Structure formats: C-alpha cells, structure tokens
Image (cartoon, helix red, strand yellow):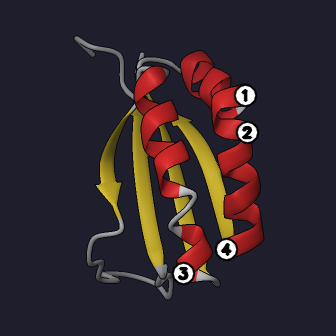
Amino acid sequence: MPAYIIVEIEVLDRERYETYRPFAIKSIAQYGGRYLVRGGASETLEGTWSPKRLVVLEFPSSEQAKTWYNSPEYGEGRAIRHETSRSQMILVEGIAEGT
C-alpha cells in the first residue's frame, strides 16, 4: 500500500537550503518516491494551521519511505535541512488499491 511523507518546513537560511534540494530530489526518485506537493500556495480552510512550506511525498510503501529517509544518499541532505530549516515530518499509510 502506498505511503506518504508529509513535511512542514520553515526555511531559515534560503541560500544554504537550496544546497539541500538536489540531495532530496535525486534520493527520493532513487528510492521510488515522487513529489505530490512541493511548496505551492496553501490556504487554511479550518483551524489555525498555516505552514510556511508544505511537501507531500508518495512512496510505494512505508518500508520504502523509511528506507529512503535512513539512506546514505539522503543523509547528507537531511543534515543540511536540519541546519537550514525547522521541520515536522510524519509518515502515513495510504489506501490499498481496490479498497
């Protein structure tokens, strides 16, 4: 069943954050993931949540998503993201096909 990583990001150092993006883009694709949402405009419809930047990734499974997250290919990029932004990230399973 597909799995989704949802990330709320507040970029603190835009110039250095740009060095993170190539790590993310390449490693996500390498591990079978794809972007569904990447920093587009958002609008709060209910509540008070107003993320600065929102990213949604889709992977074939939660195991594949965790493999990507812990991979050496993403590790250096993750360190850059931690140094240049504040973020919250969750992994959620989707709906299996046919249900």
x, y percentage for residue 39?
36, 68
Residue linked to disc 4: 85
Q: Are marks 2 and 4 in contact (CB under 8 Å)?
A: no
First in sequence: mark 2 vs mark 4: 2
In the rendering, which numbered label is found on residue 14?
3
Residue linked to disc 2: 75
First in sequence: mark 2 vs mark 3: 3
The mark closer to the camera, 3 or 4, is 3
Q: What is the distance, in whole Å, between disc 3 and disc 1 at their CAs? A: 24 Å
- Splitting the image into 4 quarters, where does residue 66 fall? top right
Residues packed near mark 2 inside 10 Å, few (<14), some (14 to 19) or many (20 plus): some
Amino acid at circle 2: Gly
x, y percentage for residue 7?
54, 58
Amino acid at circle 4: Ser
First in sequence: mark 3 vs mark 4: 3
- Splitting the image into 4 quarters, where does residue 20 fall? bottom right
Q: Residue at x 49, y 18 (%)?
A: 61
- Splitting the image into 4 quarters, where does residue 54 fall? bottom left
x, y percentage for residue 90?
62, 48
> Quick check: 34 above or below 35?
above
Q: Residue at x 27, y 13 (%)?
A: 97
The mark closer to the camera, 1 or 4, is 1
